[in-house]
Image: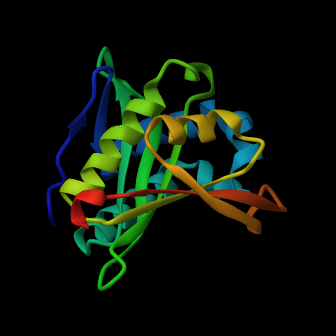
Amino acid sequence: MIKLPILKTESLVLLPAAPELARRVLDYYIRNKSFLEPFEPAKSTAFYTEGAQRENMLYDARVAEEGRGYRYYLALQCDLETIIGSVVLSEVVRGSFWSCFLGYKLDGGLQRHGYMTEAVTVMTEFGFEAVGLHRIEANVMPRNVSSLRVLEKCGYQQEGLAKRYLKINGVWEDHIHMVRLNESME
């Protein structure tokens, strides 16, 4: 199993997905269930168990080992025991594409403190420098203005609108397609 590095920002520590985080991640999801529901696919009640989270962590560790994705969980440097969000590079494609999707989420009570901007910045750097990606893509619902602002602050640019792109909480939602290119590869 490869050992992913712990990443740090001014305020955060980003911990690679690992089974020992299962309880803390479950606490995060339970604490933020109603906040996250409008922005995510519907989840079964089984998702909200420590066992399911441990299985998710094992899956994420396998995906990282295979070089197909990298999920990190966020904690404040002043409180390493409480998970406050996550950031992921998923569906890594190499060959002539060298691209992936970026996803992220943050505790509803900690919005507008710059934490997600820090996390997306360091994860983008990780994707470009450590993984060697050329393109990182993120898709955001137009009504999620805060998320769009994070991407803009991190240098992502809009490439278009994907109609009825993802099924979120039971509804096919449009998404704005945002992209950042690793211009140092060109």
Q: Quadrant of residue 166?
A: bottom right
Left or right of 57 on screen, residue 101: right
Look at the image and tell me whether residue 20 can be seen.
no
Residue under the point 48% across and 34% down = 153
Does residue 155 appear anywhere in the picture?
yes
In this rendering, the answer to whether 88 lies above or below 13 is below
Residue 133, percent from left and from top: 29, 65
Left/right of residue 48 with respect to residue 92 in the rendered view: right
Q: Farthest residue toward the bottom? A: 95
Residue 58 spot, x, y in % from top left: 35, 63
Give coordinates of residue 78: x percent, y percent: 31, 14
Quadrant containing the N terminus is: bottom left
- Residue 53: x percent and y percent? 47, 53
For the image, the number of numbered tags is 0
Q: Which is nearer the eye, 5 or 34?
A: 5
Residue at image location 26% in from the left, 71% down from the top: 67
Image height of 71 relative to 31, above or below: below
Q: With 179 as the anchor, is 174 left or right in this view?
A: right
- Of 175 and 168, nearer the camera is 175
Residue 14: which quarter of the image? top left
Q: Say whether residue 60 is left or right of residue 105.
A: left
